[in-house]
Image (cartoon, rainbow, N blue to C red):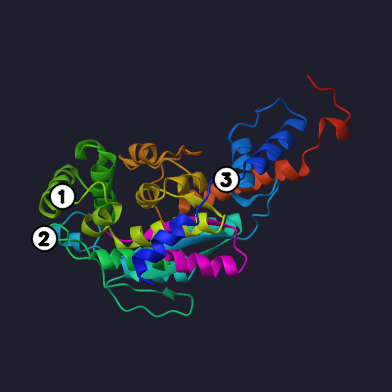
Amino acid sequence: MSELKRIEDLIGDIHSLNQDAIDAASAHLDSLTKPPGSLGKLEDISKQLAGIMGEVIPDVSHKAIVVMAADHGVCEEGVSAFPQEVTPQMVLNFLEGGAAVNVLARHAGAEVVCVDIGVNADLEHEALVARKVRYGTANMAQGPAMTREEAIRAILVGTEVVDELVARGVRILATGEMGIGNTTASSALLHVLGGVDLEAGVGRGTGIDDARWRHKQEVIRRSIQMNRPDDQDPIDVLAKVGGLEIAGLTGVILGAAKHSCAVVIDGFISSAAALIAARLAPVSVQYMIGSHQSHEQGHARMLEAVGLKPMLHMDMRLGEGTGAALCFTLIDAAGKIMREMASFESAGVSRG
């Protein structure tokens, strides 16, 4: 079976949510000692999780954040404030448990799974999931970031990682990433697939100044003019101006939906992957939970393009899966409401 056919079959296995479970969860929420709908997004989460997993009160205690790591050849154009060596250095930091996402994942009771899908260095660590497709993308300002075949292979890496996690009992996933230069690729994807002007969609990433911000826009503009990505073909866009970690996260999202698992979408780069997934399989959006709106300039427009509403506004712009890790704690809170809150009948409280 060809790799493209594997993706097509996977997409065909993604179905709409279980409406009977959603209705049962809604009835349960309305039986609890509160005005209907008064817990807002916590109730929305509970109903969505029920529909995703087909259970009124699913067990989502086994959580994992998949951090995809890869490098970007476009860094040769001077679009980032940090050098590319930071990517492998931060991967080792993740693996040793010292990054922000590790701290917040421990707080949320989630494991961090770090995948080398395209770091431009040789890495070894007992905890590393080594699935390198290539040593970073090519410079998209001089040609396609990768071949179509490499983009497809990277998507499948994401689905395979999910297969393995689900086999170990994981039922809720989150997306995280590491890759110097990845806001450039994500901004390009937003421009092509979301139709957002570069001035509105290109942010400052790790903190570039005005001159480099304008240069970053010009590099993206030149990359798109050179590669002419087809906005009706998400894989073509991903291959020409995307990134390996973005492709991998696209696979994570599609794989989660196939396995009837919820997937919490982190920040700007993760949302770029969500946009690709949404274009490939529109029904997959039903399995996504928007965690936060980051401080990155284009993130609100990216979320709008996907069709997600964030739960948090924390002015964060770190990535890694940090916003998604915080969202896990809200998901746990929603589950406790469903399991532990008294009903009008059990508490002897009169209904309105």
Q: Which residue is mark 2?
A: 142
Q: Say which residue appears at 17% left-offset and 61% top-offset.
A: 144
Looking at the image, residue 293 sits to the left or right of residue 198; the answer is right
**Viewer-proximal residue, 251 or 281?**
281
Q: Is residue 164 magenta?
A: yes
Give the answer, above or below, for where 261 lies relative to 244. Answer: above
Q: Earlier in the sequence, mark 2 or mark 3?
A: 3
In front: mark 3 or mark 1?
3
The spot of residue 143 in percent (x, y) is 13, 61
Report the disc number at residue 224.
1
Q: What kind of residue is marked 2?
A: Gln
- Residues under labels 1 and 2: Cα distance? 10 Å
The answer for how far apart the CA atoms under marks 2 and 3 are is 43 Å
Q: Is residue 271 above or below residue 42?
A: below
In-image side of 190 versus 65 (left or right): left
* Label placed on residue 17: 3
Query: Splitting the image into 4 quarters, where does residue 150 fall?
Result: bottom left
Q: Which residues are magenta?
A: 158-180
Check if mark 1's residue and mark 2's residue have beta carbons within 8 Å.
Answer: no
Given the image, on which type of amino acid does mark 1 rest?
Ile
Q: Please state which of residues 14 and 64 is positioned toward the viewer in this rendering.
A: 14
Label 3 to label 1: alpha-carbon separation: 36 Å
Percent position of residue 123, x then y: 36, 78
Which element carries disc 3, helix, strand or loop? Answer: loop
Which mark is first along the chain, 1 or 3?
Answer: 3
- Along the polypeptide, which appears first: circle 1 or circle 2? 2
**Is residue 71 visible to us here?**
no
